[in-house]
Amino acid sequence: MAVAASERQVVEAVPKRLFVAGEWREASGGGEFAVEDPATGEVLCRVADATAEDALAALAAAGRAQREWADTPPNERAELLWRAFEELRRRADELALLMTLEMGKALAESRAEVLYAAEFFRWFSGEALRLDGYVKRSGDGRSRLIVTREPVGPCLLITPWNFPLAMGTRKIGPALAAGCTMVWKPAQLTPLSALALAGVLAECGLPPGVLNVVPASDARAVTEPLLRDPRLRKVSFTGSTAVGRRLMAAAGERVLRVSMELGGNAPFLVFDDADLDAALAGAVTAKMRNVGEACTAANRFLVAEAIADEFARGLAARLSELRIGRGSAAETQVGPLVSAEQRQKVAELVADAVDRGARVLTGGNAPAGPGYFYEPTVLYPVPDGARLLREEIFGPVAPIRTFASEEEALAEANASEYGLVAYVYTRDLDRARRVCERLEFGMVGLNQGIVSNAGAPFGGVKQSGIGREGGNEGIDEYLETKYVALAAG
Ligand code: NAP
C-alpha cells in the first residue's frame, strides 16, 4: 500500500541522523538501518546507525555539558520543560501520525500517548522548582547539618518500542529537572519518535550536549562501552526483565545507579459483587490499550465462578466488535503488532493454550494479507500450565480463569515472578482494602483499567523492576543526597 502524502511528510520532516552535542550527525561508520511500517511491512525510511564510537562521543558531550546544566537556574530548567510540554501538545497530531507509522497502533492511541508523554514535562517542570534540602543543628549543637540534593550526573537511557515517546519523556523530564545530562538509546523499531522529540527539545532551547540520541541496530555494541565508562553515573532502562537483569549485572561492575522498569504479568480480578459492565469496560482498556503490547496489559483474567461465563461472553462480544486495520485509518481501533516476531510469539502462546485444552471464544487467528495483525482473542477456560499464564503475551489475547474464593484469587494473582500492576473489580469496600493490601504489586487499578498518570509513582516490585517514574518519587531517581557538616563555631 502506498504511503499517503501527509504520512510521507511527517516521516520526511524527521532528521534521520544521530543527535550529538546539539548537532545532527551521520553515524561514524556511515551505516543506516531501516524503519518499517508494521501495517504493511514496507520500509518507511532509513536512519543513521550509531556505533560504539558515536555512543562514546555522545557520552563525552553529555559529560562536557553536565556542570553547566547542573548550574542552570531551576527557573530556566522549568521553563524549558514547560515550553516542550506546550510544543508536544501543539504538535500532537503530527507526532501521533509518526508514531502510528513506525509502531502500528491506532491514531487515537498514538495521540493519547503524545499527550501522556507531554504530561511528564508538565509535571517535572514543576518539580524542577522544588529540589529542596534542609538544615538542622547537630545533637551536640557543634555543627549545622546541611543536606542538599544534587544531580546524579550523565545518564544512559534505554527505552522500548511500545511507547516510543512516553517511555522517553518519563526519563528525560526528571533528568532535565534534576540537572542531569543524557545519552538516549531508543528502540531500533521506533527511532523516529525519539528523533522528533530531540528536535522539539532543541527548538525549545535545550543546550547542546544535554540530551544526545543514538539510534542503533546493535543495542549491546553501543551501550556496553558506556556502562564501562567512568563518565557515566546512571542507567535507566525500560524493557524486558531478561535485558534488565543483564544491564544490572553490568552496572554492578561500576556500582552505577540503576532504575529498572521491566516486564509485567498483570492479573485482572473480578469478584462476584463487581459492577459487571464497569469490569468489562475496564477489561477492554486494560487488555487492548496499545494492542496489548504494554507492560501494564492485563495478562490473566481471574473471575469469580458465579459470573465467569457471563464475563467471558461479554468480553468476547466487545473484543469481536473492534475494527482491525492500518493504524492511520480513522476508523481503526486495533492496529497491527509491531513485528512479525511479536505476532509469531503471540500465535505460539495461543496455540500452546489451545493444545492444552483452552477454548477460543473469539479470534485466535492472524488475518491474511500484509502487516502483522492478530485478531482480538478471548480464551475461556484456560487450564493450568498454559504458557501465557506465566509469560507476557504482549498481544490482544485475553485468557480467562475462574476462582472459588478470595484466598484462591489472591494466591493465583501473586503466583508470578512479576509484580508491576494488578486490577481489581469489587464494590465491597472491606474486600477492596484487604485485596489491595495483599496483592504483591507496585500498582493496583481499583475499579479502573488504567493506572498510568504522570503524577503517580509508576513502577513494580519483584522482577518487574526497581525505582519509580513519575509522581513525587520520580525525581529522586536522578538525585544524590549530599550532606555538609558546618562547624557552628
Ligand atoms: P527489550 O528487548 O528489553 O528492549 C528494550 C530496549 O533495550 C531496546 O532499546 C533494546 O534495543 C534495548 N536492548 C536490547 N538488548 C539489549 C542489551 N543487551 N543491552 C542494552 N540494551 C539492549 O524490550 P522490548 O521488547 O523492546 O519491550 C518490551 C518489554 O518492555 C516488555 O517486557 C515490557 O513489559 C517492558 N516494558 C516495561 C515497562 C515498565 O514501565 N515497566 C514499560 C514498557 C515496556 P533494540 O530495540 O535494538 O532491541
Image (tube, helix red, strand yellow):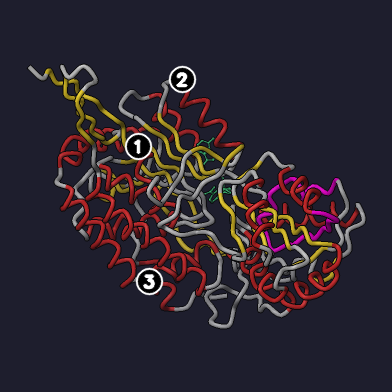
> How far is disc 3 from disc 1 in space, using C-alphas?
27 Å
**Amino acid tagged 2:** Glu
Q: Position of residue 115 (x, y in %)?
A: 40, 67
Q: Earlier in the sequence, mark 2 or mark 3?
A: 3
Mark 2 = which residue?
253
**Amino acid tagged 3:** Ala
Question: Does the segment drawn in magenta span residue 394?
Answer: yes
Cβ atoms under marks 3 and 1 closer than 8 Å: no
Cβ atoms under marks 2 and 3 closer than 8 Å: no
Given residues 141 and 390, the one toward you in this image is 141
**Amino acid tagged 1:** Cys
Q: Earlier in the sequence, mark 2 or mark 1?
A: 1
Question: Does the segment drawn in magenta span residue 153?
Answer: no
Q: Quadrant of residue 116?
A: bottom left
Say whether residue 465 is visible. yes
Task: Tell me the magenta residue range.
Answer: 385-405
Mark 3 = which residue?
92
- Residue lying furthest left: 489
The image shows residue 302, relative to residue 219, as above or below, that is below
Q: Position of residue 413 (x, y in %)?
A: 73, 49
The residue at 48%/68% (across/down) is 110
Q: Position of residue 250 (x, y in %)?
A: 49, 25
Q: Earlier in the sequence, mark 3 or mark 1?
A: 3
Mark 1 = which residue?
155
Q: Quick check: which quadrant has ligand 1?
A: top right
